[in-house]
Image (cartoon, rainbow, N blue to C red):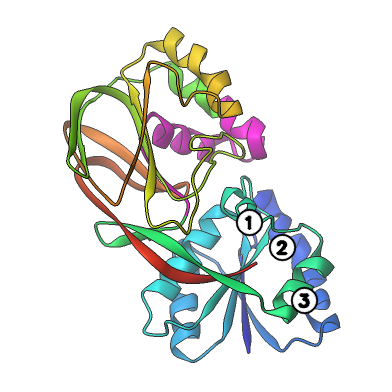
Amino acid sequence: MIKLIANPIAGRGRGREALPAAEEALRHQGLHFATEVTSRPLEAMEIARRAAEEGCELVVAMGGDGTSHEVANGLLSSSNSEVTLGMIPIGTGNDFADMFDTPTDLTALCQRFREGKTRLIDVGQVNDRYFVNVLGIGFDALVSIESLKIQHVLRGFPLYLAAVFITLKEYQIPHITVEFDGERLSMPMTMINVANGKREGGGFLITPDAKNDDGVFDLLIAEGLGRLGILRLLPEVIKGTHVDKEPVTMARAKRVVIDSPDPLPVHADGEILYTDAHHLEIKIIPSRLRVIT
């Protein structure tokens, strides 16, 4: 049995509009499924956990990165380690789905569900929350907060680019200490990304060499930059050519600890976890989640 969890407001309402076509595509493939539509934040997590506990073999997240994040957390917090995650990406960014070359055509997607080819991927854990794509601390978490305020106007890459310019107006650079696999850096930092995937924000290639099944995080640590410095770096991050630029440190690690006397905004897969964190412990869990490919 398949559980389809649909977020009706994903992609500025595309979730609601596309649901009948998605259900018809599933039926056309001869797949047996039950649909639940979310109505509030974190409900997808609860539905996914319950579906896994009831023995569902495949749970499909129909929405964007936030929906996939919630569904993955529900599956990972269940006692069913055999359940598989599928995605119908109709959200704003769809960065996690991009790691699997997920088609946007519903027929092709549902054929994948019927064929049932999967692979195991790593997941990250920060305190008591899981993430599957990127954990962002500092500037890019504030960008995520600002993007929520204007998502009724824009979507995709233009949405996040506009949010960058809004964030630049008042961003205060925090002092952060980060420890990772025996290394320690302590200085003003614009942002830190602890990444399982390559991109965020609808196409910013923050960690272009990341693989989500290699057992390690890819880290981006950006030194404290003024507005002009961030604007100079921005085109490089869009293209993924920032990795050898002086304001940026790239690294790989299995465990990361972050401390700051300043309040840190934090997002996981684009979902805001904290606006005032001071201590974060982050670890990777290898080969923990099975995903349709």
Q: Is residue 266 left or right of residue 277?
A: right
Where is residue 134 shown, x and y percent of the image? 44, 47
Q: Earlier in the sequence, mark 3 or mark 2?
A: 2
Q: Earlier in the sequence, mark 2 or mark 1?
A: 1
SS type, badge 2: helix
CA gap, disc 1 to disc 3?
Answer: 17 Å
Q: Secondary structure at mark 1?
A: loop
Q: Foreground: 96 or 36? A: 96
Where does label 2 land, which residue? 16
The one of 273 and 102 positioned closer to us in this rendering: 102
Kindly indicate the quadrant of the structure image that contains residue 156.
top right
**Mark 2 to mark 1 CA distance (whole Å):** 7 Å
Q: Residue at x 49, y 23 (%)?
A: 242
* Residue that label 1 marks: 9
Q: Which mark is in front, 1 or 3? A: 3
Question: Can I make out residue 23 in this image?
Answer: yes
Estimate how packed mark 3 is, as few (under 14), some (14 to 19) or many (20 or more) residues with alpha carbons within 10 Å. Answer: some
Frontmost residue, 185 versus 272: 185
Height in image: 134 above or below 245? below
Q: Give the amino acid type for the residue marked by disc 3 in the picture.
A: Glu
Res. 155 visible in picture: no
Residue 225 at x, y percent in the picture:
36, 14
Tag 3 residue: 23
Q: Residue furthest top?
A: 228
Q: Are marks 2 and 1 in contact (CB under 8 Å)?
A: yes
Which class describes the residues within 10 Å of circle 2: few (<14), some (14-19), or many (20+)? Answer: some
Residue 271's spot in the image, x, y percent? 44, 50
Which numbered disc, 1 or 3, marks the residue that appears first in the sequence?
1
Magenta: predominant secondary structure element? helix
Task: Give the structural element (helix, strand or loop) at label 3.
Answer: helix
